[in-house]
Amino acid sequence: MGHRTIAGFAASAFATIALSTGALAQDWQPSGPINIIVPWGAGGSTDQVARVTAPLIAEALGVNVVIVNQPGASGSIGTQAVLDAPRDGMTWTANAIKNNATYSVSGLIEDTSIDDWHIYLSVANAPLVSVPADSEFQDFGELLEAFRTRGEDITVATAGGTSSGGTAIASLATAGDFDYRMITYDGGAPAAIATASGEAMVTTQLAVEQTELVRGGRLRALAILSDQPLIVEGVDPVPPITDWLDMPIAPDYFGIFIPRGVPDEVIATMDRIWEENVANSDALREYAETFGAVLAPSWGEEARARSIPIAISDACGKASRGEAVIEPAELGFDCETMSEIDSQ
Amino acid sequence: MFDGLTLLGDGLMHFLTPASLFNVAWATLVGIIIGVLPGLTATMGVALLVTLTYPMPPDQAILCLMCIYVGAIYGGSRTAILLAIPGTPASAATTLDGYPLALAGKGGLAMGLATTSSALGTMVGILCLVLLAPLLAEAALNFGSYEFFWLALFGVVISGRLTAFDDPIKGYIAGILGLLVAMVGMEGLHAYRRFTFGVPALGGGIDLIPAMVGAFGLAEILVVMKRRVAARIVDASDRVIPRLAEVWKYRRTTVRSGVIGTIVGIIPGVGEDIGAWGSYAAARRKSAERDQFGKGSLEGLIAAETGNSAAIPGSMIPTLTLALPGSAAAAVLIAAMFIHGIRPGPMLMVENAPFLYQVVAMLVLATLAITVYGLLLTRPLLRIMTVPRERLMPVVYVLCVIGSFAITQRLFDVYVMVAFGVVGFVLREMRYPMAPLVMGIILGTLLDVNLRRGLALSNGDVSPFFTRPVSAVICTLIVLSIIFSIPVVKRRVTSLFTNARRTTAGRD
Amino acid sequence: MSDAKNGQPSDAAKSSLSEGLSPPQQAPGIMERADLLTGIVLLVLGVAVAWMSWEMPRLEVRRIHPATVPGLVPGLLGLTLAFCGAILALRSVRASADAAGWRVFGGIFVSPEAGRVGATLALALIYALVLVGTLPFWAATALFVFAFIVTFEYAFSASRSPLWRTVLTATVQAVIVGVTVTLVFQFGFLVRLP
């Protein structure tokens, strides 16, 4: 009967192939489905952008692009898996670029830097400070006061120390000179949901992860970590953090990254796809407008240049809080001038 | 409620496409074959097929896995009736009356009634799933870290308690071992690598699928190959399709067994086999023809087959709403859902409400398919049963090896499969149940992260774990079930499920 | 349910026993001895896990909440395992006193069943750990299937068919399985086989 079962399996395999889209001519033709490992939970900011971008790439390459969520340990488990995978161009990751640039600073992944990746940026996201709808805090001023007086009694839900929310609360604490108690969840969406349910008192995850809950009246948005107010349909404009605190703001870029060492034609093909199929896609624009992200497509050297400020501010922030296991200078980041050392 | 009906309609329409129906057709057939073959269980079938459905779109992949699950639980009844060997553990209770019926020349009738009972049982379970799951999901939206810690612990404890063969402590030990397996690798709060002993591959932890393929595949192969003699098939040439009157006569038994099966299914980590034993025991207690049980009672056969099938939709209730697996196979389904980006749990109804109703539609389609196959494909299924194990098992093992390799394409996962196969076989021989081990592996992270997160939230204070109402209830349940498993206490308390087991063991 | 306790053993019951659903019909004391040994192993394992958890870093430099140290849950689990192992061992100590019982216990490792298990295990391990990765996948698979069938149809079978027939049919099945599985997975499921 073994053969009979195998016949069944084979039939299913061919059905699957028939379902995948037809291929377009490209210089690089992947031999199978491409895996994008999202090292965060499904529904989070990284996952959302990856899922908007994946079909665009799938259509252009003519193969399936599969999103694999591999959350855990501030995204380092999934990222490590991509670094460990064969460099055949079939395994990519999606993340916020500052994470990939600073995993070695926090010690989560040893010996890695921004130059381990070919960078394809799609959007920039800003963290949003929110509290449950029934919270005692009506605006950010009240919350800031509470942080300064009650410190570690205020619980802040994030997706972990190196997540966008974790970095945001850390830099807020530095700028506002206060203490807090961070509670780690498996991703940005779970952190936002836990805050909406009242388990945590504040969340500083990204706006895109919270807009649905804010729109549904379950979270109250207090301030956006940007120098511009956040304006999204169905939500009152959210004031910028600069109304209360004087702090550096670096745009937090998200995108898809391919590990260095893959064949050149992979990168040539992806450069063209990003320019022709992703940068000006309606799907990505619509996503950004609905969820409060900023459309910011770039690739190659430009993408790297754009990523450096947030990477430096994140790495130096970790170092100043004593969370770094290696000096940012080892990555070529100068924390005095907040710029890159040229020898890099 | 009206929303629910609309979504249910949408769910059914969603799968009324040629591609979906084709998947239902082959997947259910593969499921039945897996069920018919002794040594291939539903859990292993689902685990192996996760690999094969990996490239499919999420809805089709889960559809196939669900059909395999339903098909395998049903298929086991064939072997139970004609061979007196349960094709899967779920049909153990079916052998008691099915085989005597076959010996008495009523094999066809037994197969027919097993088919209709399985179908009706699944339907009763589906009804409960549609009614209860949205309510439970709504309630679970208020669950926080404290509650999820207790739910995870409850899942492991209750599964250890109820699936242990004769010794609850072995169930608990299996559960703790599973939890410890889940501790290996990088933990979720601070990214510390625990128990990796310098092996980089262990940093990502031990995947459930290769572990399951080992514990249910290789271990089962060893069990099958250990037996010295193979069993003989009873001839069954009488009418297969039952009369309506025969089905109608036992309507009470059918409904009661369906409800019991569903409830057992809902209990985390306690699945179809206990569902069958539970409804079998209840049917005998209520029956007018009690002395016929075990000698070829139609009622007993109906009770067992209804009970095990109803446990499938039942097990989906906690699986979908709490991410707490209702059975061992459901644990594998959760792993499969995560692989496909579907996140079961309280948020499912908020984020992806249609999915719940798609699962309902999958179950309905699978039920229709087993009815059609069951009543029409008698001869070909008979032939499958006669495949000698010496010829079948090497092929199964090849599929185990490649199945554990294929998802991550690491040889490391093959070694995991082999290790779990050997350990699983040894534990099985010493009468440790496998279900709590599975529950431990899948619930370990939930338990660990939520305990420590809860402690962080309360600033190190343990009292919220005991004072919040839902936490207090679950905690009490856990304490009670552990206390009742202490022999002195147990002797005084008659529990339905353990009694069913003890008496069937006694009567044999 | 006491009415059921005096039934006759039936064929159905026996086979359900062999499926491991009810207590195995073995010489008394065997399970107790197995329990005593596993109890001790589990006790040692539990203590080792608890000790390793205690030794785990507390990550003070990262300023984590002291109640969330990585070793907390594994430590608790280790202690519980050690406790359960101790109960298991203590319960079985009295039943395992006589030396004759240990000889019976040792006997199960040289029984024909143990031989069958040993052969299956040896074949399975050689295939998964040695052949796969050394030989091309189809060849490794074919070799394993062939060896398995011949071992059990010839060496371990009471009613053996002629050797040439077993070898012939086994070869045919081995080649078909090896080639089909390889083709299906390599080209159907796009798995890069070892």
Image: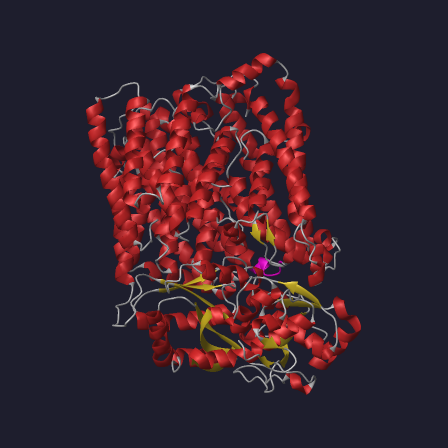
Toward which corner of the image does residue C159 lie, by quadrant? top left
Q: Left or right: where does residue C39 sit relative to residue B207? A: right
**Tally of marks:** 0
Toward which corner of the image does residue A167 lie, by quadrant? bottom right
Query: Relative to the observer, which residue lies in front, B502 or C33?
Result: C33
Q: Point out the residue furthest to the top here.
A: C100
Query: Relative to the observer, which residue lies in front, B318 or A125?
Result: A125
Query: Relative to the observer, which residue lies in front, B378 or A174?
Result: A174
Q: Left or right: where does residue B271 sit relative to residue C86? A: left
- Reply above or below: A317 against B43: below
Residue A131 visible in the current orientation: no
x then y, percent, for residue B371:
31, 44
- Reply above or below: C15 against B183: above
Residue at the image position 57 percent from the left and 69 percent from the top: A102
Q: Point out the residue furthest to the front here.
A: A343
Colour scheme of this structure image? secondary structure
Q: What stretch is highlighted in magenta?
A: B138-143
- Reply above or below: A295 against B367: below
x then y, percent, for residue C170:
24, 32
Residue at the image position 33 percent from the left and 24 percent from the top: B231
Q: Left or right: where does residue A15 sit relative to residue B277? A: left
Residue C24 visible in the current orientation: yes
x then y, percent, for residue A317:
65, 74
Query: Relative to the observer, which residue lies in front, B316 or B302?
Result: B316
x then y, percent, for residue B442:
53, 49
Residue A108 is inside the magenta segment: no
Residue at the image position 22 percent from the left and 34 percent from the top: C171
